Image (cartoon, rainbow, N blue to C red):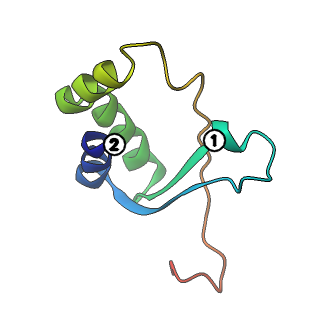
Amino acid sequence: MLGSVKAFYVLSFLCGAAVMLEDAPASLNLSVYILEHPSRQEAEKNWAAFQADPEWKKVKAESEANGPLVDHIDRYFMDPTSYSALK
């Protein structure tokens, strides 16, 4: 897992990460990473670079030795609210 976090830092700014509360449905099956990019184009470029990163590929392969850990990835693009600390 450390390799994946390191790769995120190389490619973008990690604003936060979270998991759902225990009482939420599917709480054991959801992780959320919030990343900041200068533009949507940069986000697409960074995602492609992250997936192609040799260190990430190695860490991913090792972590999935007994089967995949993720069945799908949902990506959303958001803008901070006017009162957000991100502004």
Return the disc, 1 or 2, that comes first in the chain's sequence. Answer: 1
Q: Which of the 4 image quadrants contains residue 63?
A: top left
Task: Mark 2: give few (<14), some (14-19) or many (20+) Cα within 10 Å.
Answer: some
- In this picture, is 47 found above or below 64? below
Q: Indicate the position of residue 28 as horizontal and vertical percent values.
A: 66, 40
Name the one closer to the observer, 77 or 3. 3
Name the one closer to the observer, 7 or 39. 7
Task: Mark 1: give few (<14), some (14-19) or many (20+) Cα within 10 Å.
Answer: some
Q: Indicate the position of residue 49 as horizontal and vertical percent values.
A: 28, 34
- In this picture, is 58 found above or below 29? above
Q: Indicate the position of residue 6 as horizontal and vertical percent values.
A: 24, 49
Q: Which of the 4 image quadrants contains residue 13?
A: bottom left
Image quadrant in which the N terminus is located: top left
Eye-nearest disc, 1 or 2: 1
Quickly name the residue at label 2: 46
> Mark number for residue 30?
1
* Residue at the top extreme of this rendering: 66
Q: Which amino acid does label 2 sit on?
A: Asn
Q: Indicate the position of residue 33 as horizontal and vertical percent values.
A: 51, 52
